[in-house]
Amino acid sequence: MPILSANAALLFPDFDMNSASISSFSHGEHCLVKAEVRCQRTVRFQPVATEIEFRHSAGMEIDLKSALKRRGMSQQQLADAIDVSKGYISEIASGKKRPSIETLEQILDAIDADIAEIIPTRHVIAVPGYVGAGAEVYLSDPYPKGEGMYKVACPPQITPHSVVAVEVRGESMEPVFSEGDLLFYTRNGDHGVPSEAIGRKCVAETEDGKVWVKQLKIGTAPGLFNLLSINPAATNMLDVRVKWAAPVRLHLPKEFVKRVE
């Protein structure tokens, strides 16, 4: 089936063909269209999936709550505007229910919004490597910017800007962090340990080039730190020099990791 933009019917209202078939057309990303082909006759393009239908069918997250807040509009006001119950709107806003395409169009009309506002395109974050939780892992990122071993959908709790994701290797941080889990963090510069990292679970690089996830504590002398394991069966790293450390911003258990192409 050919893939064209949502404006395909406007761009190609009449297309004279001298052959009996079309192999493919490509213009844009989302709107699927079908074409009737007749030898020596005009080809008519008929949209069969709008942008609303595409985003709805793709299962993208609906952010109705933020759209209402920006407009100073209550859930009750929206419910009254489209003649549904406030409870139904509340379930849509909380993600418990997914509206039909017809209801979604009514919501967009009622709040005067574009589909991209309440169903935004999901950002992705590359996972360039591993972090050691008992296992020895050297800091390595051989991939171009924005690439990695694989990519994951950016969790809604954080923005993708300046965020790094790493996969846990080892069991020294059990039961909090398990092998295969993802940790998201942001580095503020290439060197140093910020004060907010002290006492927190951090991704840290030691002077030998290895990268760990540990709880970071101050050591016995200036410039030295203790990297502590949570698993009582694992060893701690005492009075080591740390090149940099960044607190873990978000932990995603492996069963919730969704890889994207």
Image: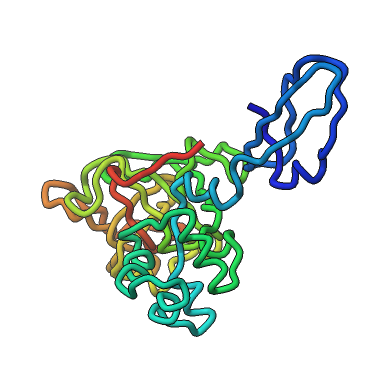
Q: Give the residue at x 41% y 72%.
A: 83
Residue situated in front as seen by the camera: 88 or 258 = 88
Residue 24 visible to an observer of this rendering: yes
Residue situated in front as seen by the camera: 142 or 105 = 105
Name of the residue lying farthest toward the left: 232
Residue 82 % position (x, y): 46, 71
Splitting the image into 4 quarters, where does residue 180 fall? top left
Residue 100 % position (x, y): 43, 54
Q: Give the residue at x 61% y 64%.
A: 114
Residue 117 % position (x, y): 57, 64
Residue 1 % position (x, y): 63, 26
Name of the residue lying farthest toward the bottom: 72
Q: Give the residue at x 50% y 57%.
A: 163
Residue 218 visible to an observer of this rendering: no
Vertical arrangement, residue 134 with respect to residue 71, above or below: above
Vertical arrangement, residue 209 with respect to residue 214, above or below: above
What scheme was used to colour the molecule? rainbow
Q: How many marks?
A: 0
